[in-house]
Image (cartoon, rainbow, N blue to C red):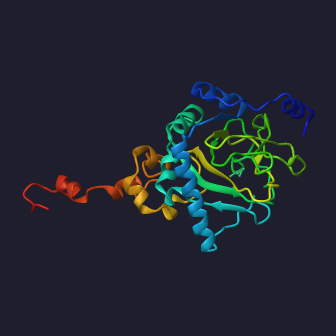
């Protein structure tokens, strides 16, 4: 790290939690992160928590616990493709506060790149320190993605709260091997939303507890010029597409203009009423359909 970089980090702080969306938007721009307490009310939090632990238990029963290259050890349980696992996750993906933050930092449209859960288990290792926009070549002068982390169990210093390096978004690069331990745990109450931009360095903390599981849900969004981490066209449960709002369809790449088309048309062409299109095109006098 250069002396200039060290000075930049030394003066940087993580912002305090807020309920004011305008302040959150500003924090995200200035600090690369914002913290919104009580973003989920008690009822919604309970629905989300029940759903994630039910899905985790189902996956464990089927020994479906995919490894992820950034995680160390076997104690972290990752669950991918959340919108396909329970409607409550699709609801979170297009939460109005999330959409406001995305619009403010990245503009619109953006894509949901992936939506996964990370459950840090007792005795769990940390993960590799990283910035989510590692796929962007060159120096990063702008954020290209935003990760919206939903805190489902209280994040504590003991149970593996996500570690963040304040000010690291201004360095414009990924962390190096000797920069793995610069982060501090972000202590947060269940129901908090932590949104952080793609240049900010972070990692899963070490879970030193005997029996506490710590669930966080990570909805990662990118500008729509990038390939998404999850290939929604292969992995998404079709029933989600059939009932999704226009906002959700946009986030999943099904409602699109100019990019991601199928034979020159948006993928939603598949939802078109073919009979109506044929009627419109048919020359007058041809048999009714
Ligand atoms: O589980 C965590 O605390 C962090 C997860 C993470 O870094 C990620 O999904 O990019």
Residue 22 image point, x, y percent:
58, 25
Q: On the rendered structure, is 56 left or right of 10?
A: left
Q: On the rendered structure, is 240 left or right of 75?
A: left
Considering every residue shown, the one lying at the far bottom of the view is: 62
Residue 47 image point, x, y percent:
52, 51
Q: On the rendered structure, is 256 left or right of 280?
A: right
Instruction: Name the foreground residue: 250 vs 289.
Output: 250
Count of numbered circles on the image: 0
Q: Is residue 257 above or below residue 83?
A: above
Q: Is residue 23 visible?
A: yes
Q: On the rendered structure, is 54 left or right of 121?
A: left
| Quadrant placement of the N terminus | top right
| Quadrant placement of the C terminus | bottom left
Residue 187 image point, x, y percent:
74, 40
- Location of residue 264 by image quarter: bottom left
Residue 71 image point, x, y percent:
76, 59
Instruction: Name the foreground residue: 173 vs 243.
Output: 243
Q: Residue at x 76, y 32 (%)?
A: 14
Q: Residue at x 85, y 27 (%)?
A: 11
Considering every residue shown, the one lying at the far right of the view is: 3
Q: Residue at x 80, y 59 (%)?
A: 210
Q: Is residue 265 visible?
A: no
Considering every residue shown, the one lying at the far left of the view is: 285
- Location of residue 7 by image quarter: top right
């Amino acid at each position: 790290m250069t002396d200039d970089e060290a000075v930049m980090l030394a003066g940087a702080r993580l912002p305090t939690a807020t309920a004011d969306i305008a302040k959150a938007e500003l924090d995200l721009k200035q600090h690369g992160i914002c913290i919104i307490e009580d973003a989920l009310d008690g009822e919604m939090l309970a629905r989300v928590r029940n759903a994630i632990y039910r899905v985790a238990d189902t996956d464990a029963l089927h020994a479906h616990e995919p490894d992820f290259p950034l995680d160390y050890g076997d104690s972290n349980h990752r669950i991918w493709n959340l919108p396909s696992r329970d409607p409550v996750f699709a609801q979170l993906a297009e939460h109005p506060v999330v959409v406001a933050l995305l619009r403010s930092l990245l503009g619109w449209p953006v894509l949901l790149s992936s939506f996964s859960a990370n459950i840090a288990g007792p005795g769990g290792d940390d993960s590799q320190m990283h910035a989510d926009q590692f796929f962007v070549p060159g120096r990063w002068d702008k954020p290209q993605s935003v990760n919206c982390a939903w805190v489902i169990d209280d994040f504590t210093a003991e149970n593996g709260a996500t570690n963040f390096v304040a000010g690291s978004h201004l360095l414009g690069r990924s962390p190096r091997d000797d920069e793995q331990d610069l982060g501090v745990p972000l202590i947060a109450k269940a129901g908090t939303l932590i949104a952080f931009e793609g240049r900010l360095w972070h990692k899963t903390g070490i879970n030193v507890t005997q029996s506490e599981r710590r669930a966080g849900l990570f909805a990662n969004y990118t500008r729509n010029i990038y390939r998404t981490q999850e290939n929604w066209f292969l992995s998404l449960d079709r029933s989600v597409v059939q009932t999704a709002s226009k906002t959700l369809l946009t986030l999943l790449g099904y409602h699109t203009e100019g990019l991601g088309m199928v034979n020159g048309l948006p993928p939603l062409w598949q939802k078109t009423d073919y009979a109506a299109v044929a009627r419109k095109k048919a020359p007058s006098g041809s048999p009714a359909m």
